[in-house]
Image (cartoon, grey):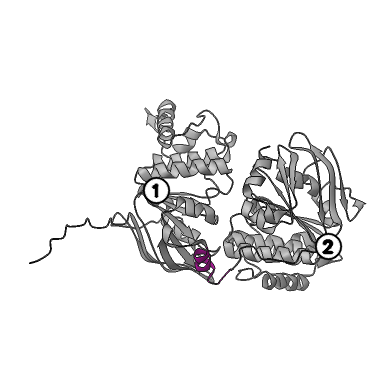
């Protein structure tokens, strides 16, 4: 007698399969035979350190790069993408961290740009508006269709990108660091929209360095390291610590390295700093050997405050002292000369000249001591640059590699290198680890600890509350341009305590 076993349905075939994908650049093998798959109605988190190959793999999928070897199948049909248009026609949409929108056009004009709805040779604007409205209804959101994209918030611009993907009937949507510039409320709204996309059978690839988000939004995780796929797991079968270990290839027993705290007298003192309604009478001090965190919600005035200290914006009132002496700061060059360095929030737009080499970027704030009688001492410049490449373990083919071709983490290290070479007394870190991986974060944290151990003062802005609680000696919370609270017992503080002050 044979047992009767009910036939179980066969497992669903992957919506997307990439097999044996290889991609090389001069001096770098970015992908070394990567296998990757995505199911319909699934959120797959793609993780890895900066330079692991995530962006390269997605650019191959998006048609921006042609693979040297390997195969791509969508619904079992082989694909040959030679351009982004080929990828889009196959149902793939890639939403990059820097949105691909025309600022002066409205939401509906951006959505249908390049495939306009026409009638008798004229663009049917009314029909496009109706279709755009239907797309936003499908996402469960409302957008002002008459506003230009430059008038929309970052979160609203992201919704326009998602609507644009749906307009192309995308079945695969790649989101690269989608929450980097969003508030916690906007992130929650984004997750709700992703759930709606899942219900519609759309597969989502979610790239982020924020591990808390991954455990909230993802169904499955794929980890790349050094151009290889090192494993895939259902989200419920992997712990945070295991995930970090898989990403960096080594144990990180503590995400925030410990240090002995020896805080001395104030180095930077700011009193009554004011600029319109953005900064309204901010006072603060940072001691020798101290990390002071400046936090609050987006728009609280954090970045505006440090730009006033650095002389990047004009202040209406306020006094700035360094080691007891009053500073006259009218421009960033005044701040640099006084011994203050600023790692800007946006390293691509404000921290680096992307078209210049790593060496040239390193030298920019240091030309006064790298030059003699008006001429740059090329040998000294190269030697000093090489010293910091080694010290910070910057992954470059050489110091002549163009800064724009580096990964986010390595770009941040270049910005760090130029200020370290300047030997500033006060360093302002504005979102120092935004968009970089957990391994690179740890290295930056170690470096921050090393700097304060040397007696330097660090003013750190961060939107990541675990980072604030893990690295700061003291916390100041801003709301609408004012200091609403100070936390001195950071070890006992909670994220909820910070948020209460941030919305006061």
- Front position in the image: 255 or 380: 255
What's the CA distance linking mark 1 and mark 2? Answer: 50 Å
Q: Position of residue 41 (x, y in %)?
A: 36, 49
The span shown in magenta is 241-252
Q: Position of residue 383 (x, y in %)?
A: 74, 74
Q: Which mark is residue 88?
A: 1
20 or 430, which lies in front?
Answer: 430
- Residue at 61% x, 69% y is 395
Q: Position of residue 359 (x, y in %)?
A: 69, 66
Q: Is residue 190 above or below residue 13?
A: above
Mark yes or no: residue 124 visible.
Answer: no
User: Dot 2: few (<14), some (14–19), or many (≥20) neighbours within 10 Å?
Assistant: some
Taking the view exactly as shown, the residue that stands out farthest to the right is: 325
Check the image and name the residue furthest to the left.
1
421 or 203: nearer the viewer: 203
Q: Secondary structure at mark 2?
A: helix
Does residue 50 show up magenta in the picture?
no
Residue 149 occupies quadrant? top right
Q: Earlier in the sequence, mark 1 or mark 2?
A: 1
């Amino acid at each position: 007698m044979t047992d009767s076993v009910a036939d179980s349905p066969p497992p669903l075939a992957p919506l997307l399969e990439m097999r044996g994908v290889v991609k090389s650049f001069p001096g770098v093998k970015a992908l070394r035979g990567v296998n990757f798959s995505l199911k319909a109605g699934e959120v797959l988190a793609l993780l890895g350190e900066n330079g692991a190959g995530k962006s390269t793999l997605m650019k191959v999928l998006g048609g921006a790069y042609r693979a040297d070897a390997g195969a791509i199948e969508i619904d079992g049909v082989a694909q040959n993408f030679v351009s982004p248009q080929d990828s889009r026609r196959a149902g793939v949409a890639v939403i990059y961290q820097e949105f691909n929108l025309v600022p002066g056009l409205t939401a509906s004009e951006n959505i249908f740009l390049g495939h306009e709805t026409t009638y008798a040779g004229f663009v049917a604007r009314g029909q496009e508006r109706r279709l755009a409205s239907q797309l936003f209804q499908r996402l469960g959101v409302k957008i002002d269709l008459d506003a230009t994209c430059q008038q929309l918030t970052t979160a609203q611009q992201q919704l326009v990108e998602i609507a644009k993907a749906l307009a192309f009937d995308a079945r695969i949507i790649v989101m690269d660091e989608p929450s980097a510039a969003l508030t916690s409320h906007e992130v929650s709204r984004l997750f709700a929209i992703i759930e709606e996309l899942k219900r519609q059978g759309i597969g989502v690839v979610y790239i982020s360095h924020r591990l808390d988000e991954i455990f909230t939004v993802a169904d499955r995780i794929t980890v790349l390291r050094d151009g290889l796929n090192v494993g895939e797991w259902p989200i419920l079968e992997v712990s945070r610590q295991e995930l970090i270990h898989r990403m960096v290839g080594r144990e990180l027993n503590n995400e925030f390295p410990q240090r002995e705290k020896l805080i001395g007298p104030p180095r930077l003192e700011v009193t009554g700093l004011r600029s319109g309604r953005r900064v309204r009478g901010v006072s603060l001090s940072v001691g020798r050997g101290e990390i002071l965190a400046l936090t609050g919600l987006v728009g609280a005035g954090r970045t505006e405050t440090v730009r006033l200290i650095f002389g990047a914006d004009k202040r209406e009132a306020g006094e700035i002292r360094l080691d007891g002496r009053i500073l006259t700061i009218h421009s960033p060059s005044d701040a640099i000369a006084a011994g203050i360095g600023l790692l800007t929030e946006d390293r691509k737009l404000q921290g680096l000249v992307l078209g210049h080499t790593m060496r040239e970027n390193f030298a920019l704030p240091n030309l006064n001591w790298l030059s003699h009688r008006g001429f740059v001492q090329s040998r000294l410049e190269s030697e000093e640059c090489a010293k910091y490449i080694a010290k910070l373990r910057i992954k470059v083919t050489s110091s002549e590699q163009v800064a724009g071709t580096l990964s986010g983490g390595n770009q941040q290290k270049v910005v760090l290198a130029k200020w370290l070479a300047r030997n500033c007394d006060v360093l302002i870190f504005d979102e120092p680890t935004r968009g970089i991986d957990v391994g690179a974060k740890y290295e930056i944290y170690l470096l921050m600890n090393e700097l304060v151990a040397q007696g330097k003062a660090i003013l750190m802005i961060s939107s990541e509350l675990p980072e604030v609680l893990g690295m700061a000696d003291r916390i100041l919370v801003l709301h609408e341009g004012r200091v609403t609270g100070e936390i001195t017992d950071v070890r006992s503080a909670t994220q909820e305590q910070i948020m209460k002050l941030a919305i006061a």
